[in-house]
Amino acid sequence: MIRFPCPSVVMFPKEKVRKEVATMRYIQQNTSIPVPLILHYGMADECPYSLEPFIIMEYVEHAYDLTELFKEHNSAGDRMAIDPNITDEKLSSVYEQMADILLELSKCAFPKIGSLVEIDEFEYSVSGRAMTLNTNELVQLRNFPQSKLPSQTFNSSTSYFRALANTHIAHLSTQHNDAIESAEDCRRRYVARHLFRKLSTQPRLTSRDDKIFKLFCDDLGPHNVLVNAEFKIVAVID
């Protein structure tokens, strides 16, 4: 199958594709987590009609994703309800498999905060800036200037929190539509952001200056976990 970043939703398509490929390949080579095999990827100039950067990967045969497996049949919209008819055995099996996946992810440790970049075959470096879902949505939905996003990696949690605090403050001053509900709401948000920045300059958010950082995905949820008819997880995607 071929995947493209969603136009007007993904703000940094080239960066996203390169980092997603590097992360998937690293996970496949260094953990037992099942992820689709990447056959090829490229930028828009390699794509017919120059559409978008793309990833070509194997299609993983599956019966459901965990959202379809667990949701109550009459639940609708964004509200998720676990089907009350699911057996304890089925539920325990899936929870145990998810626990194994999280334990495997916890083995992936790095000396800096940022994103993985593929240097060479089987060689990776944390040399890209941290790209989170929040980073993308700040630009997509909240009028945030891209030039104000942190562009570096971080050697400590403290330095990352400081950059995050400055980003929160810049967000409040640059989002012009629907940012606040009233003058009091604006004061509350302003004070909260400056308190967080004050905390970030003090050694109070971390017990020590961390030197080891774990791999983290802020979109690891039931919708991105595929299972077969026997409820065995066959792939973690996206």
Image (cartoon, rainbow, N blue to C red):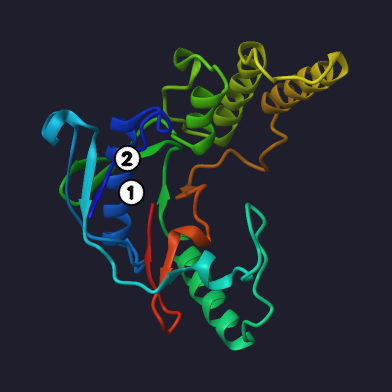
Residue 168 drawn at (x, y percent): 64, 23
Binning the other alpha carbons within 10 Å of mark 2 as few (below 14), some (14 to 19) or many (20 upward) gives many
Which image quarter is the N terminus in? bottom left
**Amino acid type, callout 1:** Thr
Q: Which residue is mark 1?
A: 23
Residue 181 drawn at (x, y percent): 80, 21
Residue at disc 1, secondary structure: helix
> Can you see residue 126?
no
Relative to 68, does residue 53 appear above or below in the rendering?
A: above
Cα–Cα span, label 1 and label 2? 6 Å
66 relative position to 226: left or right = right
Task: Determine whether label 1 and label 2 are within 8 Å by CB.
Answer: yes
> Can you see residue 46?
yes
Q: Residue at x 49, y 26 (%)?
A: 140
Q: Residue at x 22, y 60 (%)?
A: 37
Q: Residue at x 48, y 49 (%)?
A: 216
Q: Which residue is mark 2?
A: 19
Q: Quadrant of residue 151?
A: top left
